[in-house]
Image: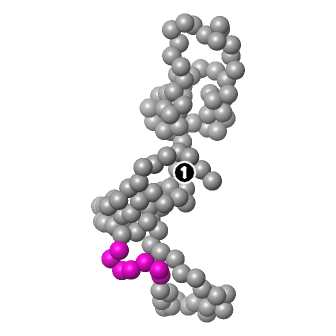
């Protein structure tokens, strides 16, 4: 497998490419002496994740859920003006405020935790 295609900036890896790179069992003797070791962290930088900003949540009964209509207001567990929770793949990693970013919403990070890959896996 040609590893140069895995390290080009901007490329995205398929699951198959990542697994091939991580499980390549070619004997060390077959590799040239000057071949650098694979940098797993460099490969992992290309794995897409989902970043979300959670406004809050509310526990409602099925009865209440069935009665929600167009102008219903549901109180959430987050205070107005309080920073919101930043999540990566459903795991909280920090807090942020909502800002305008051009014509879209954006987030301004106000608190971020150390991000460890072990904490982002289920």
Expressed as whole percent of the image width and height from the top left, the position of residue 104 reads 36, 64
Is residue 66 at least partly visible in the picture? no
Is residue 32 at least partly visible in the picture? yes
Looking at the rendered structure, the number of numbered marks drawn on it comes to 1
Expressed as whole percent of the image width and height from the top left, the position of residue 54 reads 47, 68
Q: Quarter of the image holding residue 6?
A: top right
Q: Quarter of the image holding residue 28?
A: top right
In this rendering, would 39 be left or right of 103?
Answer: right
Using the image, determine if residue 37 lies above or below residue 6.
above
Expressed as whole percent of the image width and height from the top left, the position of residue 67 reads 61, 93
| Residue interval drawn in magenta | 76-82
- In the picture of the structure, the residue carrying the numbered disc 1 is 119
Whether residue 81 appears in magenta in the rendering, the answer is yes
In this rendering, would 61 be left or right of 118?
Answer: right
In this rendering, would 64 be left or right of 8?
Answer: right
Badge 1 element = helix
Using the image, determine if residue 37 lies above or below residue 49.
above
Looking at the picture, tell me which residue is in the foreground, 112 or 15.
Answer: 112
């Amino acid at each position: 497998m040609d590893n140069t295609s895995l390290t080009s900036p901007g490329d995205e890896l398929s699951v198959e490419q990542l697994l091939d790179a991580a499980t390549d069992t070619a004997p060390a003797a077959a590799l040239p002496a000057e071949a650098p070791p694979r940098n797993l962290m460099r490969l992992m930088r290309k794995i897409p994740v989902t970043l979300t900003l959670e406004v809050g949540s509310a526990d409602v009964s099925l009865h209440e859920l069935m009665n929600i209509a167009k102008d219903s207001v549901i109180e959430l567990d987050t205070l107005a003006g309080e920073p919101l929770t930043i999540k990566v793949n459903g795991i909280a990693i920090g807090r942020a405020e909502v800002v305008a970013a051009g014509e879209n919403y954006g987030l301004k990070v106000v608190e971020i935790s150390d991000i460890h890959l072990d904490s982002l896996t289920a």
